[in-house]
Image (tube, rainbow, N blue to C red):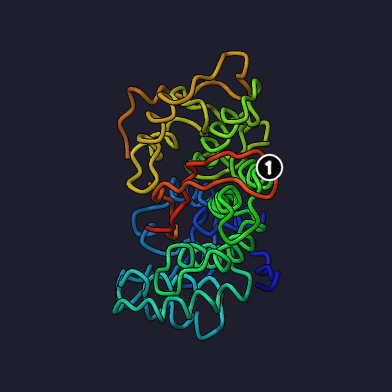
Amino acid sequence: MDDVEEEEDKCPICLNALQKDSTKFIRYLCCGKGIHKWCHNGMMLVSSLSQKNSCPLCRAKHPKAGKEEIVKLRAWVEKGKAWAQDMLGEKYLYGFGVEQSKQKAIELFELSARQGFAKAQFILGCLYDEGQGVDQSYKKAAEYYEAAAGQGIAGAQYNMGSLCANGYGVKQSFETARNWWMKAAAQGEENAIKALQDLDEEEERTTPSFIPTPIECASCYRPHGDPKHKLSRCNGCRRVYYCGRECQVKHWNRKINGHKKNCKREKRETVMSDDLDGGGDSATDNSGSSSGGSSSGSSSTGGSVAGAAGGGEEPKTTTATRVTFRF
């Protein structure tokens, strides 16, 4: 597909660019503006109850879920906004507030993807990968995954790596798979970290190819880098980082892609030596935590996929699963 990127959108609070992954910030349907989650959280701390029911930017009341929300979305779709086309597409895909229609959903995703909206590209990749509402095609899936991966969508980078590892829709190459997984792992994509560990074991590497470093908070996605904003590592798996206890607690029991299940699994599967410690003090131990946190979107692993190597490389197998878009 054409290599098109959406126009840069900025947070009106801190004036920094919003992430390409629209699941990492909040979009207001009244004024159409997006705001970083950490900026939104800061504003909510000093807002009254009545203010919390209104947009902090234009002061309009938040539309109610259902018909009001759909009316607002349609207005933005008519203006050709890629983010609105993607959001309405998701409504049709799952039948939220509208009669479910995969055909209408795909039409809206395609309109959004043509404008370079990364999440729509990722969703289309997943749909073609699984043959949901379209004729199954690994080649088309790879095209959409690559477009979204090039814009930094971690799930798309991981999925692209999995296609490369198995030789589905693209030339089979573990080297290319490793490159995509490294990019995804650098953003904290836990499936990619596990895939790299499996590949290291298969290749009998004595030094891990990837060592987690603080990039952003796993809950509010605030980036690491500000000396006053030091991220702390999860004591359980030691793979993800948080601003502090509040963010860790929100992420721990999040219904979609919560860290509780992943942390316990990774703690069992991975033994990391103390000399690999790096960046940030330890956060509260997850083993004793009990907690509860967008537009929409998250990841959940699909079925196991295995494939034989090709292209002259030493035969290997991979059990890398692909990330599936769902609420």
Q: Name the residue rendered at 44%, 74% in the picture.
A: 134
Q: Quadrant of residue 95?
A: bottom left
Q: At x 52% / y 55%, what residue is drawn?
A: 25
Q: Above or below — where is 281 with respect to 146?
A: above
Which residue is more in the foreground, 287 or 148? 148
SS under mark 1: loop
Q: Nearer the viewer, residue 65 or 5?
A: 5
Q: Amino acid type of disc 1? A: Glu
262 displayed left or right of 108: left
Is 282 above or below relative to 57? above
Location of residue 47 in the rendering, given as x and y in whole percent from the top left corner: 42, 52
Tell me the quarter of the image containing the C terminus.
Answer: bottom left
Q: Position of residue 82 (x, y in %)?
A: 56, 74
Q: Compared to 25, does 6 lie above or below?
A: below
The residue shown at (65%, 58%) is 151
Q: Is residue 261 left or right of residue 73?
A: left
Report the quarter where the N terminus lies: bottom right
Q: Residue 210: x and y, percent?
A: 63, 31
Q: Nearer the viewer, residue 91 or 311?
A: 311
Can you identify the residue that label 1 sits on?
313
